[in-house]
Amino acid sequence: MKMIFSQSSVQLFSILLVLRIIFSWAAELPPHEVNSLKEVAKEIGKRDWDFRLNPCDGNPNWATPARSAMPQYNNTLVCDCSYPGNVCHVVATYLKGQDLDGVLPPSLAKLPYVKKVEFSRNYLSGSIPSEWASTKLERMDLLVNRLSGRIPLFLGNITSLVYLSLENNMFSGTVPAELGKLVNLQTLVLSANNLSGELPLELNGLTNLTELKLSSNNFTGKIPNLGTWIKLQKLEIQGSGLEGPIPASISFLKNLTQLSISDLDGNSSQYFPDLSNITGMELLIFRSCRLTGSIPNFLSEMSRLRHLDLSFNNLEGDIPDLKELDLEKMYLTGNSLNGSIPAWINGGDTTHEIDLSYNKFNEESVPSYCRETLNLFRSYVPASNSELGKCLSKFPCLREYSSIRINCGGPKVTIGNLTYEADEDSGGAAKFDPTSGFWGTSSTGNALGARLSPLSITYYGRCLPNGNFTVTLHFAEIVFRDNMSFQSLGRRSFDVYIQGVCIFKNFDIRKEAGGVDRAVIKEIKNVVVTNTTLEIRFQYAGKGTTAVPSRGSYGPLISAISMVSDISPPISDKSIKTIVIVAVAGIVCLILIIFGVERLAFYMRERLRWERDLRGFNLQTYQFTYRQIRAATRNFSASNKLGQGGFGAVYRGTLSDGTIIAVKQLSQTSNQGNREFVNEIGLMTGIQHPNIAMATLVCYWIGLQGKTFVWGLAFLHEESILRMVHRDIKAANVLLDRHLTPKIADFGLARLFSEDRTQARTAPAGTLGYMAPEYAYTGQLTYKVDVFSFGVLAMEIVTGTPNVYPPADDLEYLTIVHRATALQQQDESLIHLVDSRLGLHFDAEEALRMIRIALLCTNNNPNERPLMSEIVDLLQGNINLQDYRVRSPETGHGEFSNLVLSPETYHGEFWNLVLREHIEEDIYLE
Ligand SMILES: *[C@@H]1O[C@H](CO)[C@@H](O)[C@H](O)[C@H]1NC(C)=O
Ligand SMILES: *[C@@H]1O[C@H](CO)[C@@H](O)[C@H](O)[C@H]1NC(C)=O
Ligand SMILES: *[C@@H]1O[C@H](CO)[C@@H](O)[C@H](O)[C@H]1NC(C)=O
Ligand SMILES: *[C@@H]1O[C@H](CO)[C@@H](O)[C@H](O)[C@H]1NC(C)=O
Ligand SMILES: *[C@@H]1O[C@H](CO)[C@@H](O)[C@H](O)[C@H]1NC(C)=O
Ligand SMILES: *[C@@H]1O[C@H](CO)[C@@H](O)[C@H](O)[C@H]1NC(C)=O
Ligand SMILES: *[C@@H]1O[C@H](CO)[C@@H](O)[C@H](O)[C@H]1NC(C)=O
């Protein structure tokens, strides 16, 4: 019985095996489709498809699994292998977030079964190729590219299209009437292009549309009749150039759930449209639409309404009773509402964000307290005509301020004689922040999709002397990049109002400054202050892109503001302009001028955290002129050049008083991000340790090869007030001074960890060969990532071999660490790994100990790696290697004293020997 069973199962197994072999042999693309794919790859700029592998067998090269750390990245070729004759066909290709720099591939038309293409967030240029007219595409997603020219007429021939998105490109001209032939179209997104002219009537034939987005264009004419699009669920017309009024036919769109109309052109005012039959509404935006009359009561029937934005209209009367709704956000700012603030708002749920600023509410109904989530800035017409909000009465004007300077989103800084006040509040969707009595902010709204920038933010100064003021606004574009990436394809545009008067319409920082990360300063003279207050408002007006670098990145950006009375002695800000190009590492002041004086807090939560961590450090400030820097570096002479860093060249310089400095020249084409730069400068100045290069005011970027050693890591991980993961420990980032004291440099990638955190998940960054496997694969970031890199570095030092290049006589192992691991597993002696150039002049026991420690550190399992402090103990011999057990994975710090070693306190001579052996061509820190 037993026998028979196992025999039959063997047979079954072989049948399965045969089937499996037949299947995988058969499941391939026909050769002409493979050839077409090769052409597609060439045209679109896809260089990493491996044609030796079968594109249809799920190989990661062709279908990369999802990575949570990079939600916009997708690399998937989809085959359908169910066709008769055991043939596969390519049916879809998703290449998203890859910065592909070619064109839309004409050869796609030679893949006749392809139905879906998604090429979003790349750097594709040109237009849509005419070859595509013959395809049977159903889905075409070209979001965030730099496609240009007119929308081709033949697009109307691809009648199979169900989904078409051209959002965030540079298409211009009119929308062709031919698009009206796409009768199956359900989604049409044309937002964030430069389209003009009137919309063709033929679009009304697209009766299957459920989603239509036309925002941020330069259309003319009125909003078309909407009544034929009865299936519409999402309609977005923000900053489109189209004129009001909102047609009455909108009331037929009963299935609408998301309706956003804003910033209508023209000057026709209108009453609130009748939406009484649209009961499934979840999001309703009528911003800057010139609505008059009262807010209708039917809103209270929209039981699913979560987000209501009626800001910047002329609405009057009372707020209807919406207390039964589960409203999360309600923005009524900038209207003429003149009833009482209802009790359901005043005493209501404080988690809901409600903005009633800039209205005319009955003064008695306005509470005198400030609440985080209820903005009552200028929400009523005060009897005394001087107050901005009742809650400011707690901050009486004790004296007059003839000048106010604010470092928007940053800490307090002093530049020369000028002090810029700290403005570190993160803002809020409906927040009135009377920060310090004499100035403050009022912010409204949030960018949809993510909380980044407010829709509108007002900076106000009060307690000012009446009279003329000069307002200076400092801007710098710090979010978009200037590289060959989709991150450079964002466009920011906002309006600036001073004392309620629009002074800049569609202000584009990058255009004004001539690039990203450059300062642009606008001075506005003769601003009249009458009621001792001055208000500067920055407002998003529906223009610009919203999907770069990620959905929700838009809104105004401001770096610093100053308001100076003409009566006070004038103080020149001129020096700010002259030194923008040069930064001296370790001297913060310059950095603060270029980047620090910026609206960090509204930018990214991550950055905000970084900012918070830096607060409280006494930053020394110096000021140099460009001329001084040039003299110090002998006009940036080649002989003074020390090296090339991520940002550009680094020069040695001598100031007139003999101080030696390093000068980092920012290059326009640098590939290191602004964020990394600010990061580094900030970290440098906050850390004081003899083994960390930046603690001295000087630093170099120099390349060393596997020759030196680090002692400061334990400090970084466990002792420093700013605890951090460096993320890029490698030989090139360890510098030696003339006493051979090693110093850790290049904090461009360092990540701070707050007191209670020991891990994070981020997109992996670092250097190949030094990156811990769990970090490279999953983005899981802990202190143990540095421990791994340290292990690699230690191994390099002992062996005198760079990790990633296999020694000439040993091609079997990828890295020197692999080789050592294999030797250890085979119980072979590790002593042969030691750098042969040392001859016999070393202590074998010390060398072996070092190799074993390096192996401990490079364990694939991060929990098995020791803490840096334990490594110090292991090196010193305080802990015996044989006795070492992993103690407490991921516990932080504080259990060890005397963690910091220097070569002097280390008793062995081995390291000094190694160091001296490799010293010839090294550059030292002074
Ligand atoms: C890639 O995108 C397609 C279409 O949007 C989606 O169905 C698929 O799950 C994505 N794949 C990964 C790995 O993210
Ligand atoms: C589109 O279709 C029309 C007929 O409907 C035809 O005349 C025209 O040549 C087609 N365009 C392309 C580019 O195939
Ligand atoms: C809407 O789409 C369906 C199928 O997708 C199609 O049969 C129908 O003709 C379309 N409607 C119109 C008005 O063309
Ligand atoms: C939009 O069109 C108007 C004319 O209708 C033109 O003056 C303006 O420059 C255009 N704006 C852009 C951004 O192209
Ligand atoms: C509106 O939605 C309902 C429910 O989803 C659906 O039954 C109905 O057909 C839709 N109406 C139109 C005009 O599409
Ligand atoms: C709302 O629907 C009712 C019943 O279908 C209809 O009588 C009324 O005219 C509709 N109102 C609007 C504004 O469309
Ligand atoms: C700072 O103030 C002092 C005197 O108060 C003056 O001599 C000096 O020129 C000022 N410096 C700048 C940069 O304005």
Image: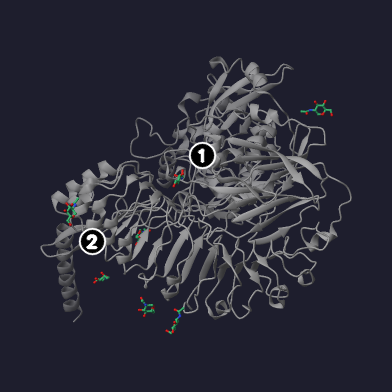
The quarter of the picture where the N terminus appears is bottom left
Separation (CA) of disc 2 from disc 1: 66 Å
Percent position (x, y) of residue 628? Answer: 67, 19
Residue position marked by numbered label 1 in the rendering: 851
The answer, for residue 37, to whether it is visible in the render is no
The quarter of the picture where the C terminus appears is top right
Quadrant of the displayed image that contains ligand 5: bottom left
Percent position (x, y) of residue 654? Answer: 67, 18
Residue position marked by numbered label 2 in the rendering: 159
Left or right of residue 371, residue 495 in this image: left
Q: Residue at x 65, y 69 (%)?
A: 316
822 or 551, which is in the foreground?
551
Kindly give the residue lying farthest to the front in the view shown: 268
Q: Can you say whether 495 is above or below 201 in the image? A: above
238 or 246, which is in the foreground?
246
Q: Residue at x 47, y 77 (%)?
A: 280
Left or right of residue 593, residue 232 in this image: left
Q: Residue at x 54, y 62 (%)?
A: 289
* Disc 2 and disc 1 in contact, CB within 8 angstroms: no
